[in-house]
Image: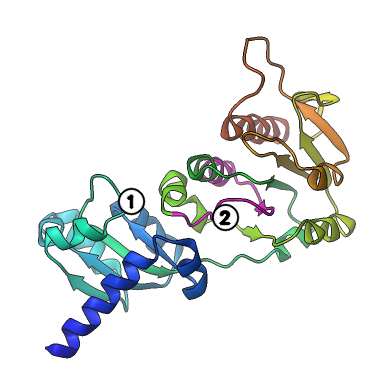
Amino acid sequence: MANKDSFKQREIKLYRSLHYRKYREKNNLVVLEGFQLLYEAIRAGLQIQTVIYTSDFAEKKESRFLLEQVQGANLLLVDTKTFNKIAQTENPQGIGAIARAPGLGFNFLLDREKSFYLVLDGIQDPGNMGTIIRTAAAAAVDGVVLLPGAVDPFNPKALRASMGGSFFLPLALLKSYEEWTGICQRRHFQVIATDPEGDYLFHEIDFRLPSAVIIGNENKGLSREAAKTADKTSRIPIDGEVASLNAAIAASVFIFERVRQVS
């Protein structure tokens, strides 16, 4: 019993520590909080290490079904007060899990069978990150590249905003702009930089060609390093009083313009 209690306390402590990026990266683990996020992770085949849940959660038929789908994971029952202390959400559902993080390689960028990528240059808002990934997954984008300064795509808020899209979409986290420059030198795709003063309107870009679209930071826009790798700059026409669109909205415009052209 003592060993079991000790294990439970270690897992609870680990769960809490995974609120922070440095511990997620150190352990190569993520937290999945809430029914839907855990369900999508199971559907995507993520390796679930530990599931922490309350008796109130387990009372529901669909909740018991979810717990039955977790193969090989440790199941830890805790009281509601304990769960609420470690929860990352404002209104906890009484279910959370620790899972192995999906891989973050960039080999998919060299696959000539794939043809459309998003490149996120310093996107820092977790909500924007998650929304962009969710939209990209919905539109069958071939992968997302995260340039330096980007928020962690496995940030709890980003994960929830992605609604599990992060589990179904290849992601590449690059540590330097030199890595991206090197990939561009070997690329088979055109690089389009989004810019409010861009030379081409978004619908003037030929997305029937293999393409990578760079979305800049919410406040600063594109970095000089990313802009230098672009073949063309493109803009979304804005006639109102604001100077630019939200990064996630801008990404959606380019994503679905590409869908329109190739459909």
Residue 169: in magenta span: no
The residue lying at 27 percent from left, 69 percent from top is 51
User: Nearer the N terminus, badge 1 or badge 2?
Assistant: 1
Q: Residue most toward the top?
A: 240
211 vs 82: above or below? above
Q: Is residue 141 magenta?
A: yes
Work out whether 93 lies above or below 246.
Answer: below
Q: Which residues are magenta?
A: 132-155
Q: Amino acid at mark 1?
A: Gln
Vertical comparison of 184 with 255: above or below:
below
Task: Write down the residue under mark 1.
Answer: 36
Q: Secondary structure at mark 1?
A: helix
In-image side of 134 versus 55 (left or right): right
Where is residue 143? Give x, y as percent.
Answer: 65, 53
In the displayed structure, does residue 105 sit left or right of residue 66? right
- Which label number is shown at residue 169? 2
Which quadrant is home to the N terminus? Answer: bottom left
